[in-house]
Amino acid sequence: MNTEEKIFNAARIVFQKKGFAGTRMQEIADEAGINKAMLHYCFKNKQLLFEAVFMNAFSQLAPQINAIFNSDETVFEKITRFTHSYISFVLLNPFLPPFVIQEMNNNPEFVKTFFKNKNTPDPSQLIDQIKKEIALGIIKPVNPKQLVLDIFAMTVFPFAAQMMVKGILHVSDSEFNQMMEERKTTIAEQIINSIKK
């Protein structure tokens, strides 16, 4: 494992435990087993490190999502695979959704740059496929973009608002994770049942 991999792994661990605001660079250096000077040599500040960790993690998810969107599967199969893949990924990288929300509010330029990246998920092929399956009578007439938004919203929201969800439903971390495991199937079932002719 090279130094950058050590730093990314350490940063993920510390960011997950303490969040962005509560994390200190010294804690990441300690977790990585390197000195703080080496950490600052690789990443000048915490924000740049956080963005690098985000891009590194998301670069693992984006190809999976695009592979699903661009596959030859039916829309129903794609919905099922997307909910399973996204939730599995975020359970392993729980710092990502709150970070995206934080960055959209605090660092909109980074978000704009991120969405210009060629590897960002592109649902255009899925949207075209939804239109075709509506025309074939497989799917009820729906706005394809609204459907894609529903898929993203139902999978992303519980993670983005995790503290609120846990507070309202009075669930522990382990109960929340179990609920998310269940949502891999239930979200797909609910969406498919609502649009299937």
Image: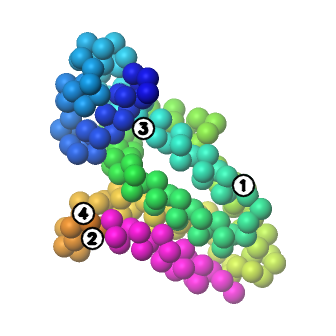
Identify the amino acid type marked 2. Answer: Glu
Q: Main secondary structure of the magenta part?
A: helix
Is residue 101 visible in the rendered image? The answer is: no
| Residue 162 x %, y % | 29, 60
| Residue 18 x %, y % | 20, 43
Taking the view exactly as shown, the residue that stands out farthest to the front is: 1
Based on the displayed image, in which of its 4 quarters is residue 183 positioned? bottom left
Identify the amino acid type marked 1. Answer: Asn
Q: Residue placed at 34% from the left, 70% from the top?
A: 178
Q: CA distance from mark 4 to mark 2?
A: 5 Å
Q: Which residue is mark 4?
A: 173
Q: Which residue is mark 1?
A: 70
Q: Nearer the viewer, mark 1 or mark 2?
A: 2
Residue 175, disc? 2
The secondary element bearing badge 1 is classed as loop
Identify the amino acid type marked 3. Answer: Phe
The secondary element bearing badge 2 is classed as helix
The answer to whether 29 appears left or right of 182 in the picture is left
Location of the N terminus (image quadrant): top left
- CB within 8 Å, label 4 to label 2: yes
